[in-house]
Image (cartoon, rainbow, N blue to C red):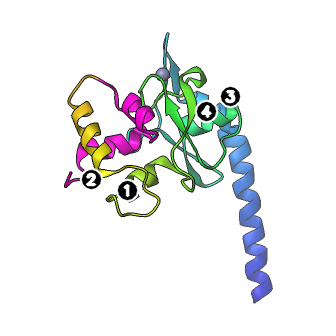
Amino acid sequence: MGKRVAWNKGIFGIKMKKRDINWNGTPEERLMNKTRKTDTCWLWEGLIRNTGYGSISIDGKDTSTHRLAYSLFNGEITDNLCVLHKCDVRNCINPEHLFLGTISENNTDCARKGRRSMGENHHNNKLSIKSVKEIKKLLLSNISKAEIGRKYGVCSTTIFHISSGKTWKEQ
Ligand SMILES: [Zn+2]
């Protein structure tokens, strides 16, 4: 019986692989299929998460489209770096608008970091109460979230969460 299960699994695995190659194309083809290039930004028009970032499934794994674009066109993203936008357009995947920025030593994903940054005492948290207060002041001005993030060495997602009150509510 155990053998039979393994056999079925094997067939299923092959089917999945075939489908990925024949129906959807390479990750690059699939990404560009749903992207509209403008004079400045390349706008991903597929699935967009409520964080504002585009999402695409690669090998069954949800992947941010701007991160995928960076790795396809610009090169490898090492784990502790975050892919940031110069243009502050979250669903933009123009490799020329993307750059790597550090967030913190152990951090691997900006969105997750933003959700996890619940306060100053939270481990692995780069922001202090003082800088959050400054950030909140900056949010009232015209400076973009990406720019504020760069100034404080965090992702624009982290700034976005502060701005929406998802994190650092008390400050
Ligand atoms: Zn752009």
What x and y, as percent, mark residue 138?
26, 31
Residue position marked by numbered label 1 in the rendering: 117
Amino acid bearing label 3: Phe
Number of the label disc, if any, that sits on residue 168: 2
At label 2, which amino acid type do we have?
A: Trp
User: Given contact means CB atoms under 8 Å apart, are the residues at marks 4 and 2 in contact?
Assistant: no
In this rendering, the count of numbered labels is 4
**87 part of magenta stretch:** no
Confirm or reject: label 3 Cβ below 8 Å from ligand 1. no
* Contact flag, marks 3 and 1 (Cβ < 8 Å): no
| Quadrant of the rendered image containing residue 150 | top left
Residue 65: which disc? none
User: Residue type at mark 1?
Assistant: Ser
Q: Earlier in the sequence, mark 1 or mark 2?
A: 1
Q: Which residues are magenta?
A: 143-171
Element marked by disc 1: loop
Q: Any atom of ligand 1 within 8 Å of the CB at mark 2? A: no
> What distance separates the C-alpha of mark 1 from that of mark 2?
8 Å
Distance from the alpha carbon under mark 2 to that under mark 3: 35 Å
Q: Residue furthest top?
A: 39
Q: From mark 3 to mark 1, how far is it between C-alphas?
A: 31 Å
Q: Quadrant of residue 137?
A: top left
In this picture, is 157 found above or below 138?
below
Which numbered disc covers residue 69? 4
Instruction: List x then y, in percent, for residue 62.
Output: 54, 51
Dot 3 corresponds to which residue?
Answer: 73
Q: Real-space Cα distance between discs 4 and 2?
A: 31 Å
Along the line of sight, which residue is nearer the eye, 91 or 159?
A: 159
Contact, mark 3 vs mark 4 (Cβ under 8 Å): yes
Mark 1 and 2 residues: CB-CB less than 8 Å, in contact? yes
Q: Is residue 145 magenta?
A: yes
**Relative image position of residue 8 (x, y in whole percent):** 74, 73
